[in-house]
Image (cartoon, helix red, strand yellow):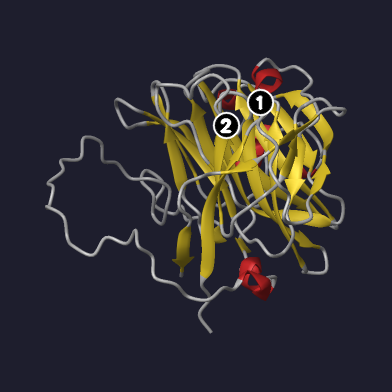
Amino acid sequence: MSRRYSAGVVILSTALLATAAVADPVQLSSPALVRQAVSLPLRDIPASAVPRLRRVHDNLDDKAYSTAVESVPATDPSVQLSVGPLVATTPSVDFAGLGFQFPPFPSYQTSSAPPDPNGAVGAFQFVETVNVDYAIFNKATHELMADPAPISNIWYQFGGACESNNDTDPIVLYDKGANRWVISRLADAGSSHFECIAVSQTADATGRWNLYAWEIQSGATGDYPKIAVWNDAYYATFRMISNSGTFLGPRVCAFDRTAMLANGTPAAPVCCQLPTTYSYLLASDWDGTTPPPTGAPNYVMTLGPMHCCFGDFTPTSRRQVVPSSRRPFPSLG
């Protein structure tokens, strides 16, 4: 049976916003920081330091899906019904990324299915991640600056699941406001599950990284993690699934960007857990050279209108999330 979802936009911020009515029960939480360290320079870590394991990742989203998010199909007044003018483009950069028979490694293949490829462009490098490897390219020459290696190599000698388990769902971003790289991924260790976040110390991805391991929730995994850069925090969204496979609802967290850039001990993240009447969340990402206005909130796309309490980095202070006044998308799928 096909599913259709109501979608809308909400606003999250660590700045004080107007009070919003809370229509659904929500929970505030603060994930535990399990480990923190600084990596060796990536250029000095042997690519074989951590074994590569081939994994096939099941689609937990369908297995642990709540039918409560289904809604009556509706006509979307924003749908474009006519074809616009065709625009010719000339690619300025074109080179092979990580994949089957990746040159100059003809025997290379991605080690998981699906491969989840993504990449980011920095000041002078391009970094690509797939399940479960990374590679660093020179942006000008397109040549490899770091051979393909397990993403867990970044956490070499870190200890714990972020080092020992080379798991899934990597995201790489370039924080243009600080000229730093950000990589996040999942790591599982039995019944415990961790979000591993690395922030480079310079614009050179082959150098040292500030490393963090967070347990988002005991007894549950933060599936489908998506991290985003904003000027007041790193925002990350998850679909929480219990160890028994039950969908618990989506969650959004704000991580202390300032401290993580400085290799300081970050303040406790603040997370907002939504009920199972909601599904996916996706935070907006600062992707250009112009920063968001000072105090501007982060915009989060959600499948369903969201009213959510949110906290800042001070445990005793609570702030609010307000729905956007923009028209929600009536249906998707």
The percent coordinates of residue 27 (x first, y second) are 81, 49
Secondary structure under tag 2 reads loop
Q: Estimate the spatial distance between the alpha carbons at disc 1 and disc 2, rounded to whole Å.
A: 7 Å
Q: Nearer the viewer, residue 49 or 297?
A: 297
Q: Nearer the viewer, residue 20 or 137?
A: 20
| Tally of numbered tags | 2
- Which residue type does callout 1 highlight? Ala
Q: Residue at x 53, y 76 (%)?
A: 72
Q: Residue at x 33, y 45 (%)?
A: 96
Q: Residue at x 49, y 21 (%)?
A: 293
Q: Which badge, 1 or 2, comes first in the chain's sequence?
A: 1
**The image quarter in which residue 248 lies:** bottom right
- Which residue type does callout 2 highlight? Pro
Local packing at callout 2 (Cα closer than 10 Å; few below 14, some 14-19, many 20+) is: many
Secondary structure under tag 1 reads loop
Q: According to the image, label 1 marks what residue?
A: 15
Whether residue 89 sits left or right of residue 187 in the image: it is left
Whether residue 320 sits left or right of residue 82 in the image: it is right
- Residue 13 visible from this viewpoint: yes
Local packing at callout 1 (Cα closer than 10 Å; few below 14, some 14-19, many 20+) is: some
Q: According to the image, label 2 marks what residue?
A: 297
The percent coordinates of residue 64 (x first, y second) are 70, 70
The percent coordinates of residue 75 (x first, y second) are 39, 70
Q: Residue at x 59, y 73 (%)?
A: 70
CB atoms at circles 1 and 2 under 8 Å apart? Answer: yes
In this rendering, is residue 208 above or below 304? above
